[in-house]
Amino acid sequence: MKKRKLKIKNILILFIIVVIIIFTLLILFSKNNNRLKNIGYSNLEIKELEKLSKNELNIIYKYDYNSNLVYIITSENYNKDKLDLYLDYTLKNSDIDYLKIFNLINHESFKKDNIDKYITYLKKFDNIDGIIKYVNEYENKNINLDSTTLSFINEEYFIVDYLDRYLNYYENHKDLSYKEIVTRINSNLDYEFYTDSTKSDLTKEMYTLVNKYNYLEKDFVPDNLVSVTGIYARDKAQLVDAAYDNFVKMADAARENNLTIKVTTGYRSYNFQSTLYNNYVKADGVKNADTYSARPGYSEHQLGYSADLTNAKNVSFDDFENTDEYKWLKDNAHKYGFIMRYPKDKEYITGYIFESWHYRYVGVEIATYIYENDITYEEYYAYFLR
């Protein structure tokens, strides 16, 4: 009997506790409900707001009614840690679409300390990406800002020192995208080939750029040249040791796939290139020769890091594109630090026709970046190495 009374007593105590909890929650609910109503939120809005945490509600209580709040908290990009900023700046700047401010605050490069500057420019321009990049990186550069300039600033490979050149080129090429104009200017295409030429910067060592704007002097001979022999060469050839060592690794890997890759020519002296180029000019004229052969001093072969390749059948350069070796190199050369130096559809940048056989050693990291981003060495050099 005593056990039964004890059991009933325990049940009664539990019931009382549950009632107290429910009653307390109802009071809190009513209190929250009233506080939100007092601020100005409707019953429908309150229904959504009550899903928030206590901390979020406490932040909301600090501010006046915000007609965009429900849209903000139900957005898939809503970040509760930024609720204070959403409320503060959408209320302060009711003349700006709340979505712009919401997207600004959520931007991956957003810096809280710069928010007032961002907002100032957001009142003038719609380009959030450009505004953030400008404030974070270039505001101290005394740039005359407009929507066109912001569009250039927003481009991935934008170089601030080239801004005037971008803008000048844009005036005569408004049919081109901002991205394309940045690509062209970074590659010096606002100048004619072989004009405004400068000496190649040899302090860059293996990364030195040699092209139709950057030349090597007549007496330049690279250090550490080694002979490419045996199964790795069709004819007598030389490469700088780093390029040679990694070419061997690449050729050996290809051989494991029953493919043969051989060097036909590597390093070429200034005089050799001069004879070769002049013979091409005699046969095809300067204009045509310039599309497939470098003028003396402007040949990357003189640097010692480039190689023209063939296969076991010693196919011609024109036929190399149709070989299994080419297909393998296209997908694997970067793993050994080589890039296809003159790719298809990039002729206007490199200045040369597509050469499926011409590869340049630049190291695995750079080669992989170029491969994954489908850019030329000219573009990479301008943005990362110049």
Image (spheres, rainbow, N blue to C red):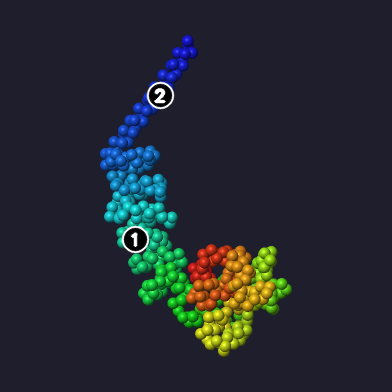
Mark 1 surroundings: few (<14), some (14-19) or many (≥20) residues within 10 A:
few
Does residue 89 sit above or below 12 in this rendering?
A: below
Q: Can you tell which mark lies on residue 17?
A: 2
Q: Amino acid at mark 1?
A: Asp
- Residue under the point 57% across and 83% down: 296
Q: Position of residue 245 (x, y in %)?
A: 67, 68
Element type at marker 1?
loop
- Residue under the point 67% across and 68% down: 259
Does residue 254 sit above or below 303 in this rendering?
A: above
The Cα–Cα distance between marks 1 and 2, rounded to whole angstroms, is: 57 Å
Residue at the top extreme? 1
Q: Position of residue 367 (x, y in %)?
A: 57, 66
Residue at the right extreme? 230
Element type at marker 2?
helix
Question: Does the image show residue 289?
Answer: yes
Query: Is 291 in front, or is 243?
Result: 291
Q: Which residue is mark 1?
A: 126
Q: Earlier in the sequence, mark 1 or mark 2?
A: 2
Q: Position of residue 347 (x, y in %)?
A: 51, 75
Query: Is 245 in front, or is 257?
Result: 257
Left or right: 140 as drawn, with respect to 65: right
Does residue 50 sit above or below 311 in this rendering?
A: above
Question: Does the image show residue 140?
Answer: no
Left or right: 22 as drawn, with respect to 219: left
- Residue under the point 66% across and 73% down: 311
Q: Amino acid at mark 2?
A: Ile
